Amino acid sequence: MDRERDIAIVGAGPAGLMAAEVAASRGCAVDVYDHMPSPARKLLMAGKSGLNITNAAPDFASKLPDTLAPMVAAFGPAEVTAWMEGLGQPGFTGSTGRVFPEAMKASPLLRAWLVRLDGLGVRLHRRSRWTGWSDDALTFADGTAIRPAATILATGGASWRRLGSDGAWASLLPGATAPFAPANVGFRVDWSRHMERHLGAAVKNTGLIVGGTTHRGEITISRHGLEGGGLYPLSPALRDGAPLALDLKPDMTLDQVRERLARGRRDSLPNRLRKALRLAPVQVALLQEFGRPLPDDLAPRIKHLPVPLTGPRPLDEAISTAGGLRFDALDERFMLRDRPGTFAAGEMLDWEAPTGGWLLTACLATGAWAGRAAADWTGR
């Protein structure tokens, strides 16, 4: 049996590392265990195209479950930005409100973070897979068994298995979890061969109609269907079977589209779509793909083009997951009701949030919350 430490944290992603920082800053002796050979692999992958760490939107909390409101109020966008800058990584806010480190990548931030944690005495145990409990001892696949004063579980969701989030931990908490489901994910479309030339094309200036509401955002034609940031926030409704339609001219009314089409009656239809409406080639292709047979009055079809989705892409391709540890299994401190002294944080909890800064900020906020609660539990 290893010597007792104040707090053991399972999972070295953003939530687990933030919990470690908060608890260690309170004077706790903290050990972090992760089954991967290096920490925060999903964070590093997210930062390859620009680490969008938070968002300056004034209604930030409105896109998160009410359950997370206290956590985000305590450690929200302003606090995340200040924390990042405190690690020597100045940030900037883009035109859409997204906040990035100036370096754009996650690696400089993570390096500085690990140095800080080391300075606080946090010990990182790599290749340590958690296997549950034996009586009151926390156990690992290599035979390690420890009895910390408090435990924080930050084991991640069930997507991007190769980066460490495999969801295998759910079997260790029977009766306390909701089934995993893909979130922030693409959706399958059975394209005809005529769409092959448009694979990889971005669909811009197009409204996404779900549940009677038109949303704006860019999507991409992939070999298997539709992808992209414009689609991801709609994942919950689409996953539950809501139909998707496209508005190919969202800045025009139905009558305006009709009037534009009527101006060039002598032109061929492709020319009218290109000249009168200025539809991009990929938009015309989508109209041909899903609008046939094209009616004489084409305006309603342009304003509301149904897209036959055949379900979300697989769980492991999702950016994040819904499902996981249910909130009714936790108290307000995020402590497991049936296991006093064990807290939880991050994406392993049953919530989902859009990309654009919400997902990562909520992981950091719940990690900070659990870190404070665990430190309180130990009396620090």
Image (cartoon, rainbow, N blue to C red):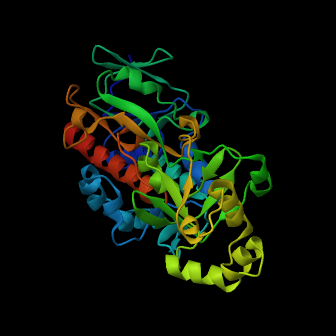
Q: Residue at x 76, y 57 (%)?
A: 198
> Total marks drawn?
0
Q: Is residue 164 left or right of residue 242?
A: right
Which quadrant does the C terminus fall into? top left
Let me know if residue 217 appears in the view. no
Q: Residue at x 73, y 56 (%)?
A: 200
| Residue 157 occupies quadrant | top left
Residue 298 position within the rendered picture, expressed as x and y whole percent measured from the top left: 60, 69
Compared to residue 185, the image places residue 257 above or below, namely: below
Q: Residue at x 77, y 79 (%)?
A: 267
In the picture as drawn, the residue positioned furthest to the bottom comes out as: 263
| Residue 4 occupies quadrant | top left
Residue 34 position within the rendered picture, expressed as x and y whole percent measured from the top left: 50, 32
Residue 328 position within the rendered picture, expressed as x and y whole percent measured from the top left: 22, 36
Q: Nearer the viewer, residue 367 or 54?
A: 54
Let me know if residue 273 appears in the view. yes
Q: Residue at x 49, y 68 (%)?
A: 99
In the picture as drawn, the residue positioned furthest to the front comes out as: 296
Which quadrant does the N terminus fall into? top left
Q: Nearer the viewer, residue 206 or 315?
A: 206
Q: Nearer the viewer, residue 216 or 181?
A: 216
Residue 191 position within the rendered picture, expressed as x and y whole percent measured from the top left: 69, 46
Q: Nearer the viewer, residue 288 or 374?
A: 288
Q: Is residue 127 left or right of residue 171?
A: right
Compared to residue 268, the image places residue 6 above or below, namely: above
Q: Is residue 351 left or right of residue 117?
A: left
